[in-house]
Image: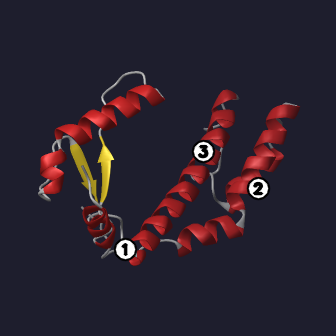
Amino acid sequence: MLNEASIAKSRRTERTFLIQQSAPHKTEKRDADALGSLLWNNRKRLQGEQRPHDIRRIFPADPADAQVRQLVNFRHHLVKQRTRIINKIKGIINKHNLSHDAPTENYATQKFKQWIKTVLLPFVDRLEINMNVEACHRSLFDATVRKLRLPLTFTAFQCTTI
């Protein structure tokens, strides 16, 4: 059985345990059974402060790492959103076989924006193109993505705590 001292020590060292679930259909009863059997099977190891079997230890990131991770995730979200918008524009251009008429292959340029305004498109496609081109050319969006570029010295390993 776990005592208060071992729980307090775990909190002091910021150690968290995560149970690896292998059940195909998770339910509260199965979760409780799995947790109970896991703790019962590892009771001696937990009391002896040894590493338990079938439990992965996770060390929460310190505040600086957490901030970097949040920044990387936010930038990833913005880049993904911009890519989705450009792919929608490309899809409509390809749907009407206009890709060879475009003045540039880069859909995020002013030259392309001016050209696409002159192209005749059906109403719904025109509406979607106008919305996506404006979203793609918003200076705030582009500036935010540029500002969120991390220094080249940052690597994924520096952002991860194992």
- The residue shown at (64%, 47%) is 85
Most foreground residue, 116 or 12: 12
Up the image or down, 83 lies above or below 9; here it is above
Most foreground residue, 97 or 77: 77
Mark 2 or 3: the one toward you: 3
Up the image or down, 106 lies above or below 98; here it is below
Mark 3 and mark 2 in contact (Cβ < 8 Å)? no
- The residue shown at (26%, 66%) is 5
- The residue singled out by tag 3 in the image is 84
Q: CA distance from mark 2 to mark 1?
A: 39 Å
Q: Quadrant of the C terminus?
A: bottom left
> Is disc 3 placed on a helix, strand or loop?
helix
Q: Is 23 displayed left or right of 67 in the figure?
A: left
Note whether residue 67 is visible.
yes
- The residue shown at (82%, 39%) is 126
Q: Is 116 displayed left or right of 16 in the figure?
A: right
Q: Is 14 displayed left or right of 41 in the figure?
A: right
Amino acid type assigned to the residue bearing label 1 in the image: Asp
Amino acid type assigned to the residue bearing label 2 in the image: Glu
Residue 6 percent coordinates (x, y): 25, 63
Sequence-earlier tag: 2 or 1: 1
Q: Is 44 displayed left or right of 3 in the figure?
A: left
Amino acid type assigned to the residue bearing label 3 in the image: Arg
Sequence-earlier tag: 2 or 3: 3
- The residue singled out by tag 1 in the image is 62
Note whether residue 105 is visible.
no
Residue 119 percent coordinates (x, y): 80, 41
Up the image or down, 30 lies above or below 79; here it is above
- The residue singled out by tag 2 in the image is 134
Most foreground residue, 143 or 133: 143
